[in-house]
Image (cartoon, rainbow, N blue to C red):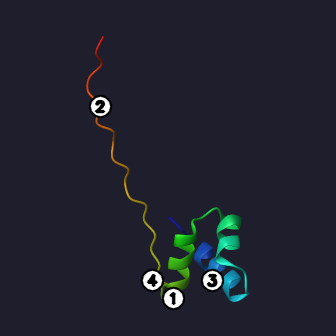
Amino acid sequence: MLILETVVRIRREYAGGKAIKAIARDLHVSRKVIRKAIRAPEGAFDYQRKVQPLPRIGPFQD
């Protein structure tokens, strides 16, 4: 989950003219998340990672 400080940093760097791809590379966050943070109204950004489903494998067989 992104904390508010990271969102503020993303917005500050974008306003300063830095490219989305460069911001994503520096912060190790996807470009999609960067775009969401930039487009969201102030304080309304919420990033929740979806729960990964467990693999469905059968019991051990000899």
Q: Is residue 26 above or below residue 14?
A: above
Q: Earlier in the sequence, mark 1 or mark 3?
A: 3
* Label 2 – label 3 distance at C-alpha: 44 Å
- In the rendered picture of this protein, how many numbered marks are placed on residues? 4
State the image coordinates of residue 61 (x, y, percent, origin top left).
Answer: 28, 15
- List the residue tagged with mark 1: 42
Q: Indicate the quadrant where residue 15 lies.
A: bottom right
The kind of residue tagged 1 is Glu
Q: Residue at the spot x=59%, y=64% of the render?
A: 29
* Label 1 – label 3 distance at C-alpha: 10 Å
The kind of residue tagged 2 is Ile
Label 1 neighbour load within 10 Å: few <14, some 14-19, many 20+: few
Q: Are marks 2 and 4 in contact (CB under 8 Å)?
A: no
The kind of residue tagged 4 is Ala
* Label 3 – label 4 distance at C-alpha: 13 Å
Q: Residue at the spot x=66%, y=72% of the render?
A: 21
Is the C terminus in the top left, top right, bottom left or bottom right quadrant? top left
* Label 1 – label 4 distance at C-alpha: 6 Å
Q: Are marks 1 and 3 in contact (CB under 8 Å)?
A: no
Secondary structure beneath dot 4 equals loop
Q: Are marks 1 and 4 in contact (CB under 8 Å)?
A: yes
* Label 2 – label 1 distance at C-alpha: 44 Å
Residue 11: which disc?
3
Secondary structure beneath dot 1 equals loop
- List the residue tagged with mark 2: 57
State the image coordinates of residue 53 (x, y, percent, origin top left).
Answer: 33, 47
The kind of residue tagged 3 is Arg
Q: In the visual, does 37 lie left or right of 44?
A: right
Q: Nearer the viewer, mark 2 or mark 4?
A: 2
State the image coordinates of residue 50 (x, y, percent, origin top left).
Answer: 38, 59
Q: Nearer the viewer, residue 47 or 32?
A: 32
Residue 44: which disc?
4
